[in-house]
Image (cartoon, grey):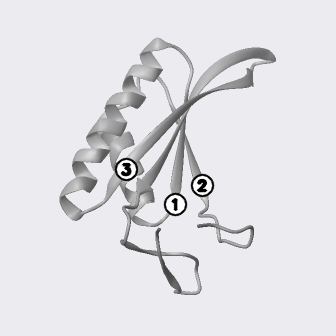
Amino acid sequence: MSNSTEHRPETGCLKVSSKSSPASVAGAIAGMIKDGVSVEIQSVGAGAVNQAVKAIAISRGFLSPIGIEIYCVPAFADIVIDGEYRTAIRFTVEPRYTRGVQRESGSSGEFSIDE
C-alpha cells in the first residue's frame, strides 16, 4: 500500500537517437536503477525507438544476475524540437519489487515490505 507521503524516487531522463549505442544506454540505465533512480527514456522516430528497446533489453541482462528485475511502461509524449511539435515515445523503466521483498522507501534508510 502507498500513501501520499511516500517518498518517490528521483527520475533520470535519457534521450536516445537512432545513432545511440544500445550497450552504452543500457549501462546508464543499469547504473541509475542500481542507484535507486527510475529512468525515463525519450526517443523520436523508429530508429531511435529501436535503439531504446534494445538498450532496455540489454540493461535487463545486466541487472537480472544481481537480483534486480525491471519493467518498462511505454507512453506517447508531445515535445517541441526546433519550434516544431513532435510525438516521442517515452519509456519509464523502474525496478520490479515482488511481494515480501524489502525495498528502501526513502533516503532516511527506512525499509518497508511490499504487499
Q: Secondary structure at mark 1?
A: loop
Q: Residue at x 39, y 21 (%)?
A: 50
Task: Read off the residue under disc 3.
Answer: 70
Residue 26 position in % (x across, y down): 34, 43
Task: Read off the residue under disc 1.
Answer: 37
Residue 7 position in % (x across, y down): 65, 71
Q: Residues within 10 Å of mark 3 (few under 14, many from 20)?
A: some
- Does 87 appear above or below 114? above
Task: Read off the residue under disc 2.
Answer: 11
What's the distance in space between the residues labelled 2 and 3, CA to CA? 15 Å
Q: Residue at x 25, y 63 (%)?
A: 67
Give 4 or 73, whichever is nearer the viewer: 4
Residue 18 disc label: none
Query: Three-letter amino acid code at disc 3?
Result: Ile
Of marks 3 and 1, the one in the foreground = 3
- Does 94 appear above or below 90? below
Mark 1 and mark 2 in contact (Cβ < 8 Å)? yes
Residue 106 position in % (x across, y down): 58, 77
